[in-house]
């Protein structure tokens, strides 16, 4: 039976991931500062540790040698309204970098073979996200670096810091109204301007998109609209 550690198990993606891994027959240890508000994720985990991953001793205790995979999703990440106001930049950089450095150190010390790190589209150069007709978000475009936010800079730094021996996938973000308020219309325009380049996914894991972005966006917006009207 494979053993996985999910950091940030109490969060949005981590909560779904725990369930997914359990369905696949994994033994799962989840770690988070908090429980998940929407579902009893701690009950799905074989072990749930409520603790602070900024603390190196905690990370040393949850990263054990018997782990096959680590999924590092824990971050100071309150969505666009938190990330793009500028007010939380110091916390974002400090907190998330500490977590990532701790995980990188322990994973490499204990010889864990696969570490998944969730980066962000925010680490791509800002100027490549301005034109919805020509977004350039391929991994090879990341340097020379010009991330669109301090959150993006931290992601880029931590990508470097984490010795990834497994699969490196970039999870994309959708910017909200706060961002437009701050930058006006001359700003990276979220998913329109940062449609992901999936060449590396195809090469490394054989994954190809099953439907065009426009179709997925339509379905998402219809769902959001329905929730707002409820
Ligand atoms: N959701 C998105 O659209 C999106 C897009 C791009 C990247 N990402 C990245 O994916 C990851 C997960 O995102 P999410 O949407 O699930 O976020 P989330 O905020 O729902 O989950 C992050 C979890 O990390 C936990 N956490 C924060 N600091 C911690 C600490 N010191 N110790 C232990 N746990 C701590 C939080 O309590 C939270 O439950 C993040 O790294 C985020 O930057 C998400």
Image (cartoon, helix red, strand yellow):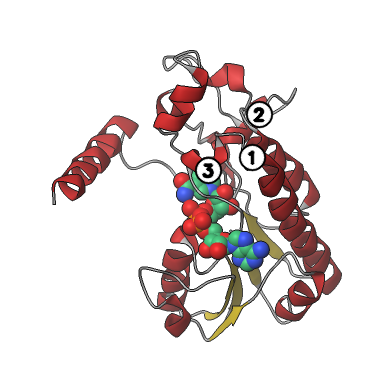
Cβ of mark 2 under 8 Å from ligand 1: the answer is no
Q: What residue is shown at x 78% (from left), y 60% (from top)?
A: 104
Which mark is in front, 2 or 1? 1
Q: Is residue 162 in view from this perspective?
A: yes
> How far is the residue under mark 2 from the one under mark 1?
8 Å
Q: Using a 10 Å C-alpha cutoff, classify the residue at mark 3 as few (fewer than 14 neighbours), some (14 to 19) or many (20 or more).
A: some
| Front-most of residues 230 and 135 | 230
Give the quarter of the figure containing the N terminus.
Answer: bottom right
| CA separation in Å, label 3 and label 2 | 17 Å
> Does 213 sit left or right of 185 as displayed?
left
Ligand 1 - quadrant of the structure image: bottom right
Q: Tally the marks.
A: 3
Tell me if mark 1 has few (under 14), some (14-19) or many (20+) residues whose alpha carbon lies within 10 angstroms of its own. Answer: many
Q: Nearer the viewer, residue 32 or 20?
A: 32
* Label 1 CB less than 8 angstroms from ligand 1: yes
Circles 1 and 3 in contact, beta carbons < 8 Å: no
Q: Marks 3 and 2: CB-CB under 8 Å?
A: no
Residue that carries the numbered disc 2 in the rendered image: 147
Q: Are marks 2 and 1 in contact (CB under 8 Å)?
A: yes
Residue located beneath label 1 in the image = 151
**Which residue: 23% across, 35% down?**
218
Q: Looking at the picture, how far across and down is residue 213, in whole percent?
A: 34, 33
**Residue 53: where, in percent of width, then height?**
70, 67
> Which residue position holds label 3?
82
Horizontal and vertical percent position of residue 185: 44, 14
Q: Is residue 205 visible?
A: no
As displayed, is residue 91 above or below residue 11?
A: above
Task: Select label 1 or label 3 by which is in front.
Answer: 3
* Alpha-carbon span between mark 1 and mark 3: 10 Å
Could you tell me which secondary element the residue under label 1 belongs to? helix
Q: Nearer the viewer, residue 9 or 3?
A: 9
């Amino acid at each position: 039976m494979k053993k996985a550690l999910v950091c940030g198990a109490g969060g949005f993606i981590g909560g779904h991931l725990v369930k997914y891994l359990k369905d696949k027959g994994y033994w799962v240890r989840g770690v988070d500062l908090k429980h998940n508000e929407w579902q009893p994720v701690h009950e799905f985990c074989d072990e749930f540790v409520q603790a602070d991953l900024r603390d190196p001793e905690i990370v040393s205790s949850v990263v054990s040698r018997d782990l096959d995979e680590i999924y590092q999703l824990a971050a100071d990440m309150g969505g666009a309204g938190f990330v793009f106001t500028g007010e939380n930049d110091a916390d974002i950089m400090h907190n998330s970098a500490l977590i990532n450095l701790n995980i990188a150190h322990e994973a490499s010390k204990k010889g864990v073979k696969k570490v998944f790190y969730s980066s962000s589209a925010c680490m791509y150069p800002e100027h490549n996200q301005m034109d919805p007709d020509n977004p350039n978000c391929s991994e090879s475009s990341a340097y020379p670096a010009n991330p669109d936010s301090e959150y993006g800079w931290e992601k880029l730094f931590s990508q470097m810091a984490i010795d990834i021996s497994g699969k490196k996938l970039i999870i994309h973000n959708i910017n909200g109204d706060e961002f437009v308020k701050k930058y006006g219309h001359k700003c990276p325009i979220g998913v329109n301007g940062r449609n992901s380049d999936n060449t590396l996914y195809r090469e490394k894991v054989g994954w190809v998109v099953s439907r065009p972005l426009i179709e997925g966006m339509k379905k998402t917006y219809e769902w959001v609209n329905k929730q707002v009207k409820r």
